Structures are given as C-alpha cells and as structure tokens.
Amino acid sequence: MPDEAPLAVVHTLANARRLQAVDAAAARLGLHPGLTLADAQARVPQLQAVEADPAADGALLAAIACWCERWTPFVALAPPHGIVLDITGCAHLFAGEKAMLAAMVARLTAQGFAVQGAVAGTARAALALARWRPGLVAAPGTEGEAVAGLPVAALELDPEAERSLAYLGLATIGDLSGKPRAALAARFGSRIVCRLEEITGAADAPISPLNPLPVYVAERRFAEPMGDEDTARAVIADLARELAGVLERHGEGGRRFAAAFFRSDGAVRRVEAGTAAPLRDAARLAGLFRERLAALADPLDPGFGYDVIRLSVTACEQLTATQAAFGAPPEEAALSELVDVLSARLGPRRVMCLQPQDSHVPERAAARVPAQKGWAVAGLAAWPAPAAEGAPLPRPPALFAHPEPVETLAEVPDGPPLRFRWRRMLHEVVRAEGPERIAAEWWTGSEALTRDYFRVEDKEGRRFWLYRAGTYGRETSEPRWFLHGLFP
C-alpha cells in the first residue's frame, strides 16, 4: 500500500459501514468520521479501509497511559481516546505546566502518535480543551473563560439533547453558562448541569487512577537511556535505601512494593513484591527484587534502554523500631524472611499457609491463603494452644480432603465402634475416646447432620479419628460412619 494513500478506520453503525476515523490525507480529501464507506469510496476510490478493533485500541490506550506514569503516578483512562493526568505538585519538576505539556506531546509524537493536549483545573475541561483548543494552558479559575467558545458537543451529551440545544440557538458553552441551572435541569435533566459545572471548573468529578497510587516513591531519571541490567539492579538497591529512610522517618514499614522500568521506546514493565510483615530493611527489599527479577518467566528486556526507573511503596503499615535483643523471636523473623523470599521466587499464590476460621466444623476451621497475607506473628495467637508434651492430640494434625466412608459395628447405637472396615481392611478397636459432638452451623442455613467424633486405637496401635453422621432416633435411623483423619 503506498504511504500516501488515504486511510480510514471503519465500523458498523446503524446497519451501515461508516468511517470511524480518518488520517490527515483522507481529511484533506474531504472525508470525515460518520460518512458511509460506500460514499467515501465513491469520492476517493483509492481509499484504504481497515476494520476497527476496539479491544486493541483499548489495550494501546492503556499502554500509553502506563507510559505517562513517568510524569505523574495519577494517570486515568478517559475512553475511547483520552488520558487524564493529575499533575498537581509535579509540574515544577518539568519546568512548568506548559513545558511539561510540550514535552509530553513531543515524546508521543516522536513515537508515531497523533497527540493533542491541554491543561486545566478539571478533567472534563482539560479533555474538552485538548480536543477543541489543543496546547492551551488554562490558569486556575479561568476554565469558564477558556471553554466559553467551545461547541456544546464538548459536553458529550446524547445526540437528541445536542439537537435540542442547537434548535434553541444554544451553540456554545458560553451560551449555556449564562442560563439558569434549574431551567436547564428541568428541560434537559441534571446531567447537563453536572457536565456544565465540571467543564467550567465549578465542580470536578472523581477519577480512578489506572494503577493504585503509591504511598511513597523514589525514582531515577537518566540523561541517556541506560540498558545495563547490573546497573538497573544497583539502581533498585539505591532506591530501596531511599525508601527505607522515608519509611523510618514516618515510623512505617512497607507491605507491598512495585518497581517500574520505563523504556525509551514507550514500553513499561512493572514488577511487584510483597512481604509477610512490615519491612523497611533496604538490603532485604533489594534482595526480594533480585529474586523477583531472576524468577520472571518473561525476563526484562531493556530494548533501547531505560530512561526512568521507579520504586514505590503501594501499601504500608505502622512499624515501631525495636532493639534486636527485645524484638520478635529470631525464629519468627527468620520465618517471615523465608516466606518473602519463597513468594518472590515462586509467586505469592504458590506459598500458602493455614489461617484459623471462626468455625467448629473441622474442614472449615482453617483456610488456605497466601502466606504473605495470612501469616503474621500476631495471628499465631488465634490458634488453640498446643497440647502439652506427651498429651494426646485432640484432633489429627492433617485431615483427609474428603471424609471416607467406613463400615462399623457398634455395641450401642450412640457408642463408639467395636470394629470397622476401611479400604477393605478390618480394624479391631481396643480403645476409644469421645464423643466430641459438632452440630450443624444453623446460622448458615446448613442442613448437615450432627457429628459425633471418636478417637479410636486398633490392636496394632494405629489411631484414627472417626465420626458418626446423625444422631440415632432423632436425625436418622441408620447413622453412617466416616474416617476423617489419622493420628501420627
């Protein structure tokens, strides 16, 4: 296809193939979005048409938004074509708002994108100015004047409302601004009033950032792209020391950390690491990211080099400094460090632990959760105190995934079994303890039968945990027996 051939993106709208977007060459020939494809090809026979791909467009917009985090961590999507950056407190780092906007547009244009931008006090005002008056930097409090000449289409109302406004002679934002808000709401609904307040700077709607906002940030910017992996790891170690100092000043420790590598060609790679307990040890933090980077299935590719590397704390907790001799026991600190290293190397969902639950039903008394979320020194107190040395265990340390049915012979219906057959082997019971009765949790709506658990021992000294499902004569006339676990 010749480079100068006009190009258009088409989609199906109202059962007709229409132009969704056109390039500069097509626009110079009089083509515009909304025109039917048949009409466009009749006017410009050499027009090249490609099918719209909304999913790919959304993915590309999200990728560009991630790249824009080099300017500010607060970046939000404004589909289908917009990106909003909250640059509060950031502009002075880039020689002011105008220079910052110019640098953004220049960098994205150099990557082959057609970009327009503007700066205003509210997201809707900035988006409208970026489309209708690109390059404008509206001073605080002047948004109303800046948008006064924009068409009412900048409010992004439904087509019927726009036609009604045009019929009444209200063609610009300035025409609407002077009208009573109550009259506009009565005629067109409250939406037009909200949009008008937002675009004139009188109010601002909340926006959601693409990624969680960091609590603390440390970063390095390079005058020339840096592509050495050893240097990148050394930079992460330096940033970890900076964050450790910040966390110490605030009396906090990080629980979640994120490293972002911004390549000069626009690609961004984020690598996250978590901890089982609050952490502000720079050496341990740097070690966690060494493990994470070494364990990546898709290793980092610096391409033409990184121009920004950022390390952020995305979640933190209070951490009081203590002397080593009076802090947590050494084995608990070592366990926390082991959990962090294994989670960084294998993935947080591959290192699990048991967390106690508020239930007496054995299979629901504990839940498997990622160790970094469920393990904590304070949480160990939630488990029952271990049995004294030499005392019999009240329950087996491990249970079967599903209780296994057994055939039993009991002396009385409510008593322990005299013998039972499990996995085609007969066991003669010589000693039994129990029962431990566990009723159904009525508040959950469960209709499960009451269980009577017995600890039994056979002639060979093997010990089993059996239960009878259902009380004889009240819940069932034929209670069934199950084996739920084995004692060591």
Image (spheres, grey):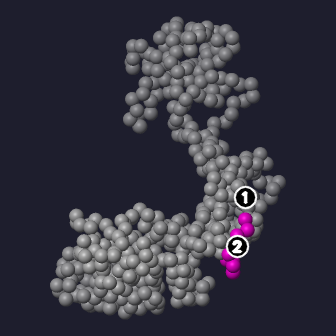
Residue at the (45%, 79%) spot, across then down: 114
Residue 226: which disc? 2
Pick the residue in front: 17 or 183: 17
User: Mark 1 to mark 2: distance in Å?
Assistant: 18 Å
**Label 2 secondary element:** strand
> Is residue 270 visible from the viewing direction of this image?
yes
Q: Which residue matches tag 1?
A: 290
Is tag 1's residue or tag 2's residue first in the polypeptide sequence? 2
Residue at the (44%, 20%) spot, across then down: 470
Residue at the (58%, 44%) spot, across then down: 369
Residue at the (79%, 48%) spot, across then down: 330
Pick the residue in front: 60 or 124: 60
> Is residue 216 visible from the viewing direction of this image?
no
Tell me the kind of residue under disc 2. Answer: Met
Main SS of residues in magenta: strand
Question: Residues in magenta?
Answer: 221-229
